[in-house]
Amino acid sequence: MAAPAVVQAPRSGPSKTETFTDNKRKDDVRMANIAAAQSVASAVRTSLGPKGMDKMICTASGEVIITNDGATILNKMEVLQPAAKFLVELSKSQDVVAGDGTTTVVLSLAHCSNNALSLLSS
């Protein structure tokens, strides 16, 4: 018996291997991530060091918390942006591993992202 012949229909649309890249969208996402990192860092920047200022946090339930602890501030923040969530998770893992330095790791990463911004713009 002869094997049946395979007939392929001509393709009229784009193939599955063709991709369209939109560099403008990538740049917008990068800039949004850097802006989110900088805004989270600016929220805790003034609480760092011996002259760190206290923050007053009002929760949704009406509870008022006054603290200068970066871990507490970041845990009470409700962030939606993925890069900002990453910073909060980074702070939590630093608190679990070392017990200190939560604000410092957030500020370090924000500074690195600011340097990345200058490299991307050049």
Image (cartoon, rainbow, N blue to C red):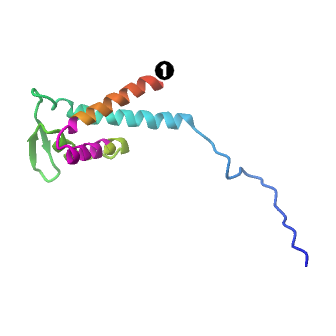
Given residues 59 and 29, the one toward you in this image is 29
User: From the viewer's perspective, is 4 left or right of 38?
Assistant: right
Going 21% across and 36% down the picture, which residue do you hit? 103
User: From the viewer's perspective, is 119 left or right of 63?
Assistant: right
Q: Is residue 94 magenta?
A: yes
- Amino acid type at mark 1: Ser
Residue, disc 1: 122
Going 73% across and 52% down the picture, which residue do you hit? 13
**Residue at the extreme front:** 98
**Which quadrant would the N terminus be assigned to in this image?**
bottom right
Q: Position of residue 50 (x, y in %)?
A: 10, 28
**Magenta part mainly helix, strand or loop?**
helix
Q: Secondary structure at mark 1?
A: loop
Q: Is residue 7 above or below residue 102?
A: below
Q: Position of residue 39 (x, y in %)?
A: 29, 34
**Residue at the extreme right:** 2
**Residue at the extreme top:** 122
Question: What residue span does the magenta drawing correspond to?
Answer: 87-103
Q: Position of residue 7 (x, y in %)?
A: 84, 64
Q: How many marks?
A: 1
Given residues 24 and 100, the one toward you in this image is 100
Going 38% across and 25% down the picture, which residue do you hit? 115
Q: Position of residue 25 (x, y in %)?
A: 51, 37
User: From the viewer's perspective, is 39 left or right of 13?
Assistant: left
Q: Is residue 21 magenta?
A: no
Q: Quadrant of residue 73?
A: top left
